[in-house]
Image: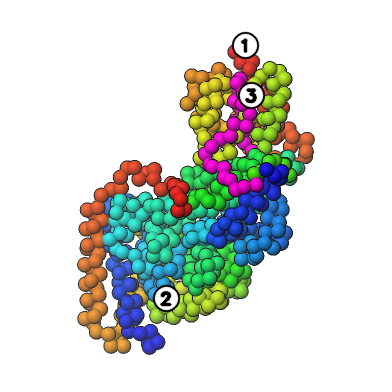
Amino acid sequence: MYEEIPDDIAVNFYGTMVRIREFELAVADLFARGMIPGFMHTYVGEEAVATGVCANLRIEDKITSTHRGHGHLIAKGGQFDLMMAELFSKGTGYNKGKGGSMHIAEPDLGHLGANAIVGAGLALINGASLTAQYLGTDHVGVCFFGDGASNEGIFHESLNLASVWNLPTIFVCENNGYGESTPQRQHQKITDIAVRGAAYDIPAEIIDGDDVGAVYLATKAAVERARKGGGPTLLECKTHRWRGHHEADVQDYRPSEELKNIEHFDPIIRWRGVLLERGVSKETLEAIDARVTLELDEAIKFAKSSPEPDLSEALTDIITPQTEEN
Amino acid sequence: MALLTYREAIRQALQEELHHDERVFLLGEDIAEFGGSMKVTLGLLDEFGPRRIRNTPISEMAILGATVGSAATGLRPIAEIMYSDFFPMAMDPIINQAAKMRYMFGGKLSIPLVIRAPMGGRRSAAAQHSQCLEAWFMHIPGIMIAMPSSPYDAKGLLKSAVRSPNPVIFFENKMLYNEKGEVPEEPYFVPFGQANIVRVGEDVTIVALSDMVQFSLKAADQLASQGISAEVIDPRTLAPLDVATLVQSVQKTGRLVVAHEANLTCGVGAEIASQIAYQAFDYLLAPVERVAAKDSPVPFNPRLEKEVLPDDKDVVAAVSRLMAYGN
């Protein structure tokens, strides 16, 4: 399967998905043990989407992320140690411990932030895409958002603006079937959010979001089109959220059958099968697993041993000081 | 010096900044061929073309979201919100994004943008096209606010706003667009955070916002004929607010009136009154007076509108109460 995807890229998919999975399981555990303050929304089960999408992006391409955003940053090149320190609210974190899980950002990687406002990234990404278009570059913008966000007014305004301005934006819907606790059938009558692309003359595609190869190839086509001035695309990745909306959510609103069988959709096991079938050795994959474990251990150590932000940080970065340069 | 209208002064600032910096562009509803609802941007499309003068759909949230996103990635957008009253359609990009991104991201981004928004009533435009919403934004750290009251300030403040690395909300008073004033031929900037002492006086300090500056000057003339010397100060920017100049003035006069067209309750006057009560308490000879709109939506009927909105008579009455205090 997926012969058009070279071995090295295919193996990288596995590595990225394992990195996201292990990071998320670790932070869930650390959160449960009270070591991480705030809220915690994990991306477990949805790893194929961020991985397959971001594998098509360059560092200059921008993404906007969501409250369930760790996977997007990892897939865009985020480092475990700086991420973990941010989640621990330490001064060494990506954002000096002032953003946390829901606002983690690294603009130098083209990551414009996780966002705790559902749908907010849909409008922001058009600005990033406009910058790319305005400056005559072939960079693109990618917005990750959920099925819940597709009912926000900002979704409709933003798709319309991207369409009428022919912006190089790829709208990636991570349809995990739930807007927090509300199942999709209760929050919209349609089953495929992709149909909303037609209302804005935006090409749209429905993808098995648990199949990283499929996500990668669909995004590849969308990104290539956008880079050539072909305008926006709406990709609906059907995926599964394994854990609660956040870690305090016991998910008693979900049918027990659904959760019992959810590992059937495991994007990592599925891709592992694809790789083994095409002759990648078990040892290669185990070596990746081992490297990820090591990287994670180091990151947790780094986060635990890092200092708190200085108290003066409470009142810095509110405005940008005016200088000759800016 | 040239005699320009407030509208022309704003347009000139836009022209100069568009020429100065290729990253500067305009976006908003009907701003291109139509020249904007207030005709401020008339002619700019011909001069700068559709890449830089961009008509948008009627989608305030998408407009301001794209404004913030482009500012975060290296451009210098100037958005127009057709009427201040449309801000409620698009608060998230300002309040949750622009004002907080730099802070949340630990200083990793700057958001250099300007949102121009016509404000105010006195045109029978009724409750949804007449509001003064500056206090909403003053409550949020991370946003700068300018409220020019003259062509000179409008041009100089707008140029400073465009050069600022921060999000700026620029409130233009609809009743002032046709007002004329002296504007230098050569480029100049009016810095943020520097109040303007518009008229020097000894007996009472009148801090006035936007077109209440004109009403207060008129009031000061009347008061002068009664032997009362009023100092009129225009803060020009609310964030940052030049509290020091206001304190100095009250230390001299011992009396303060704050005048704005926005509603009384939780208006900017409340904050200024509090700052002065704290920092100049020992100098105050009377309580602080606020002149503001009555706490009501702005009525359509012109007589009712006049009843609700403050003018020079209200300023004179407030000053008279202060002068009589304790007698």
Q: Nearer the viewer, residue B127 or A316?
A: A316
Label 2: few (<14), some (14–19) or many (≥20) C-alpha neighbours in 10 Å: some
Tell me the CA gap for discs 1 and 2.
79 Å
Q: Which residues are magenta?
A: B185-210
Res. B84 visible in picture: no
Q: Position of residue A34 (x, y in %)?
A: 28, 52
Query: Relative to residue B41, is residue A183 drawn left or right?
Result: left
Amino acid type indicated by mark 2: Asn
Up/down of A212 relative to A255, above or below: below
Helix, strand or loop for disc 1 = loop
User: Which residue is found at the position 23% from the left and 71% from the top?
Assistant: A291
Are the residues under badges 2 and 3 in a single subunit?
A: no
Mark 2 highlights which residue? A56
Tag 3 subunit: B
Res. B223 visible in picture: yes
Tell me the CA gap for discs 2 and 3.
67 Å
Label 1: few (<14), some (14–19) or many (≥20) C-alpha neighbours in 10 Å: few
Are the residues under badges 3 and 1 in a single subunit?
A: yes
Label 3: few (<14), some (14–19) or many (≥20) C-alpha neighbours in 10 Å: many
Amino acid type indicated by mark 1: Asn
Q: Is residue B155 magenta?
A: no
- Main secondary-structure element of the magenta-colored stretch: loop
Q: Nearer the viewer, residue A167 or B126?
A: A167
Q: Nearer the viewer, residue A100 or A128?
A: A128
Mark 1 highlights which residue? B327
Helix, strand or loop for disc 2 = loop
Mark 3 vs 1, N-terminal side: 3
Q: Position of residue A224 (x, y in %)?
A: 49, 78
Q: Quadrant of residue A28?
A: bottom left
Q: Quadrant of the C terminus of chain B?
A: top right
Using the image, tell me which numbered label, if any, was put on residue B230: 3
* Total numbered badges shown on the rendered structure: 3
